[in-house]
Structure formats: C-alpha cells, structure tokens
C-alpha cells in the first residue's frame, strides 16, 4: 500500500477549519497504517528502496498538514526510519532491529500529532473568538492565526515583538531594544513619549508607572519567550495579548516630547 499525499495542506498562514483538521488526522492515520503494514517488515530486513518512499511520504504528510515552517515540521520533518547509532560493520540483524525501532518511533510521532490535531478540534469547537477590531491593528497583524491554530503563547511572544517595534516606530529609537528601549522612551524624567503634561508629581507617577508596565511586559513575557514559551491556559494567554494591545494603543495616545 502506497501513501498518496492529498493536496489539502493546512499551513500556518490561514485559519484551519474543522474539515482541514479532520483531513490531517486521516492522513496521519494512513501513515500509521502504512508503517504498520506487515509487508514493510520484509523491506526493513533487506533495506529496500520502498523504505525511502515511505519515509518521504511521512515527511511530506507533516509538511502538508502543518506547513514547512511549522514547529511540527522542525521537530519531525527530517525523521529517518532508523533508531540508534549507525556504525561501520553493523550486522543485518542489528540493521533490521534499528529499522524496527525507527518505524515504531515514527508511529509514535504520528500518534502524538493526531492528538495535537484532536486538541485543536476541541479548541475550535469550544473557542469564543475575540473580535479582531478589539486588538490594536499591529498586534492583531502579529498574532494572526496563532491563537486560532492552537498556539496562544506563541501569539503572546509575537505580540510582544510587535509592541517593541511599534514603540521604536513611535519614538524613533530604533537603536534600542527590549527593556532599555522602554525605560528610555517612557522615562519619568526625560520621556520621549509622554502620557501627560508632566506638570505635577501625580503626572510623574503616572509616567513612571506606565514605564514599568511596558518594561514588565518585556521582562515577564517577551524575554522568557525567547527561550521557552510560558505555559498556562489559553484564557490567560488571551488576557496577556489584550494587555499588550492596550499598551500599543497607549503608545499611540502618548505625545512626542519636543
């Protein structure tokens, strides 16, 4: 049985429908069926050409379902049907056993990816979508379909990067980044972007407090996201996206210092 890859890719540049998710599940189930078919065992014993076809079909399936730029493809798009170290002088029996381990790993990967798609189906069924007009346009553009596609915390990281770029554009300080950018642009004493007339201690308190909000978002959400995305509920991630959007709006409202 030879896998036929259907031309129904689910890339990350568009929202995934229920039909697309189900098609992806079906395609992965087909890959499992191919990998577990008894005829493949003979091919593994003789290291037949069909092994390369099966592996290629498996990789193509992941690319079609998730997209070649997806995290799933980066994780599993170069899998080989071989488990263990490859060394000179490996015996046919050892090679066969390594092929079996590799095949079993590919089956486990396909099963895990099916579970991911099933989780996205459940999210799609239960999600209350936040209307895009509620978000600042630049934040909405950065977030794109990350939330809809089941990547809410990646959306938080993308929103943080968009906020930084927006503050750079508003202030003209493209030479700074991250926390130093926020501290300089929204400084209490010599701000580039002012939230008030800076005419009273209360004005100073507001300016300093807003500065801490901006730098706090970068320290708590952007910086950790550069290493490993924070974890938590989707609802909490959406709250953070809303906070970042509000800060982008406040940056629009701020006045450039003369």
Image: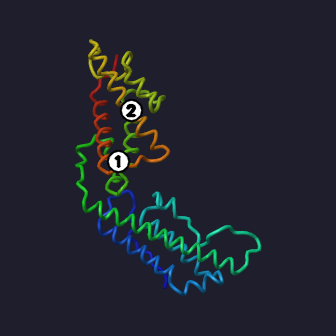
Picture residue at 52% right of the left edge, 71% below the top: 106
- Which image quadrant for residue 10? bottom left
In the rendered image, the vertical position of residue 204 relative to residue 103, given as above or below: above
User: Where in the figure is residue 153, as x and y percent of width and height?
Assistant: 38, 49
Quadrant containing the C terminus in the rendered view: top left
* Disc 2: CA contacts within 10 A as few (<14), some (14-19) or many (>=20): some
Q: Residue furthest front?
A: 232
In the rendered image, the vertical position of residue 29 relative to residue 169, given as above or below: below
First-in-chain label (1 vs 2): 1
Residue 200 vs residue 188: left or right?
left
Q: Cα distance, mark 1 to mark 2?
A: 20 Å
User: Where in the figure is residue 48, as x and y percent of width and height?
Assistant: 63, 82
User: Where in the figure is residue 28, as x and y percent of width and height?
Assistant: 43, 73
Picture residue at 35% right of the left edge, 57% below the top: 150
* Disc 1: CA contacts within 10 A as few (<14), some (14-19) or many (>=20): many
Please give the residue where the numbered disc 2 appears in the rendered image.
216
- Which image quadrant for residue 208? top left
Q: Marks 1 and 2: CB-CB under 8 Å?
A: no
Picture residue at 37% right of the left edge, 45% below the top: 156
Q: Nearer the viewer, mark 1 or mark 2?
A: 2
Please give the residue where the numbered disc 1 appears in the rendered image.
143
Q: How many marks?
A: 2
Q: Nearer the viewer, residue 142 or 39?
A: 39
Rendered image: mark on residue 244: none
Residue 94 vs residue 65: left or right?
right
In the rendered image, the vertical position of residue 22 relative to residue 224, given as above or below: below
- Give the secondary structure at mark 1: helix
């Amino acid at each position: 049985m030879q896998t036929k890859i259907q031309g129904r890719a689910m890339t990350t540049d568009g929202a995934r429908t229920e039909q697309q998710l189900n098609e992806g599940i079906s395609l992965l189930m087909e890959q499992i069926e191919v990998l577990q078919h008894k005829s493949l065992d003979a091919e593994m014993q003789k290291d037949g050409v069909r092994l390369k076809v099966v592996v290629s079909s498996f990789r193509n399936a992941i690319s079609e379902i998730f997209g070649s730029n997806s995290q799933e493809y980066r994780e599993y798009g170069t899998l080989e049907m071989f488990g263990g170290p490859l060394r000179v002088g490996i015996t046919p029996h050892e090679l066969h056993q390594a092929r079996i381990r590799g095949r079993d790993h590919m089956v486990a990967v396909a099963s895990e990816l099916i579970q991911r798609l099933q989780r996205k189906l459940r999210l799609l069924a239960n999600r209350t979508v936040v209307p895009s007009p509620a978000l600042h346009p630049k934040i909405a553009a950065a977030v794109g379909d990350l939330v809809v596609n089941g990547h809410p915390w990646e959306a938080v990281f993308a929103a943080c990067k968009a906020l930084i770029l927006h503050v750079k554009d508003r202030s003209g300080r493209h030479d700074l980044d991250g926390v130093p950018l926020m501290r300089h642009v929204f400084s209490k004493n010599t701000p580039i972007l002012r939230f008030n007339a800076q005419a009273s201690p209360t004005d100073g308190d507001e300016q300093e407090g807003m500065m801490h909000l901006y730098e706090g978002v970068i320290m708590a959400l952007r910086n950790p996201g550069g290493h490993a995305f924070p974890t938590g509920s989707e609802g909490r991630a959406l709250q953070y996206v809303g906070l970042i959007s509000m800060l982008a709006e406040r940056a629009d409202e701020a006045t450039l210092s003369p």
